[in-house]
Amino acid sequence: MQVLQLCHRIPYPPVDGGSIAMHQITGGLMLKGAAVKVFALSPVALENNLAAIDGDYRSKTGFEAVSVDTRVRIIAALANLFTTKPYNIQRYRSKRVDAALKKILSENRFDIIQLEGLYLTPYIPLIRSLSGAPVLYRSHNIEHFIWKRLATTEKNPVKKAYLRMLSSRLQKYETEIIHDVDGLVAISEVDRQFFHSNGYTGPSIVIPAGMPDIAFPDQRPAAEQRSVFHLGSMDWRPNQEGVTWFLKKVWPLVTRKDPDLLLYLAGRRMPHYYHQFASDRVKVVGEVDNAIAFILSKNIMVVPLLSGGGMRVKIIEGMAAGKTIISTSIGAEGIGCEHKKNILLADKPEDMAAWITECTQNTAFSEKISKQAQEFAAQHYNLNRIISDLLVFYQRFYSK
């Protein structure tokens, strides 16, 4: 089987939720015998990622990338106000991408073309004009959910109005574009149900991010017991919003009861703003060399998301690593976990602070939650089974 995987950004190395979810598809399909070609958009702000791609990955995947300037331009953003199209999507349109896709599709035949995320969908008409392969859309999240929730928490009335407009345009776009693809590969059941509730009747499947086997080393390093940590890409606005809320609203309540507890903030592209919170009790780590090793070295994971969509891959990693996870309801959305069984959920600062205190003081309770989380991940997020399910789904669309 020949698969063309179109990615909205470079999926290698797999260092955050989005790149992990894409890379698992690439590697999993190749292990099952499929030939996968990866073509990625490379936003200018992330171009240094190209240097991290090794030759082995390039040769195995036939990797190609095209630079796309997705930076917000004031004049373009203002001009967009007089249209009905979402500016977020328009920023990913590029004539250079058109040219590269034309070359790839004219020189190769594919059995499946998979679009990783909403930002690839503007290229559907071009793909259709050059290839008869089925086009599948992998929904990494419901994009307008993110902006709608951000609008809800925004205090500035002008920004709130703009975010609401953007959310409305994205919602209209998402509910229309889904009818232009041949199949839906949703990352969570929440995503799939959204599209079905908005009139999509085509083939669909839920393909979440899988459980990383490397989270189960033979000799696990000893975790720092009196530690709390957050790990996530810090250039993603929902993460910034959630971490700021946690630092200002939750952590002071925690330290009031337990002043000796340590908090670690880790993640790529950490804004300088967060260094002002650094202290003996708050360690601003920034990017880590090995995410799994970092997770294993700490005790309680917090996921304080107030907005966002899709599913949090870091929660799956944390569960697989046997961590006790305390999250907001939005953070745990789409995973299928259960409060007080394999995760702890809290949407109010005082509730999240109370669960952190309970877990640090009642280790037996915390260990019970973490053990059941690990069992849950092993049962529901086995990567080998997930890829096998995806291949069965693919077979609905092509003949060998």
Image: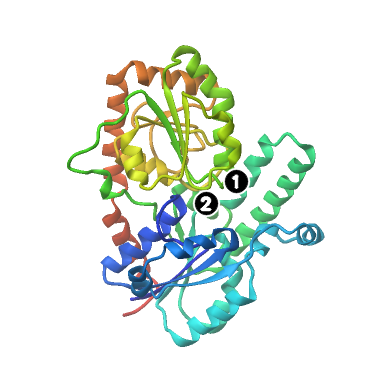
> In which quadrant is the C terminus drawn?
bottom left
Residue behind mark 2: 141
- The residue singled out by tag 1 in the image is 146
Give the class, few, some or many, for how many residues have Cα within 10 Å of label 1's Cα (few <14, many ≥20): some
Q: Residue 185, how many percent across, how many down?
A: 44, 60
Q: Position of residue 170 (x, y in %)?
A: 66, 55
Find residue 226 and report its image quarter.
Answer: top left
Disc 2 secondary structure class: loop
Residue 307 visible from this viewpoint: no
Residue 14 figure quarter: bottom left
Do the residues under discs 1 and 2 have CB atoms within 8 angstroms? yes
> The N terminus is located in which quarter?
bottom left
Which residue is the extreme one toward the top? 257
User: Residue 81: x percent and y percent?
Assistant: 79, 57
Q: How many marks?
A: 2
Report whether 179 appears left or right of 162.
left
Residue found farthest to the bottom: 107
Residue occupying the point 50% across, 32% down: 328
Q: Is residue 143 depicted above or below 247 in this figure?
A: below
Circle nearer the N terminus (1, 2): 2
Vertical arrangement, residue 128 with respect to residue 307, above or below: below
Vertical order, 223 against 349 (above or below): below
> Of residues 194 and 338, which is closer to you in this image?
338
Q: Amino acid at mark 2?
A: Asn
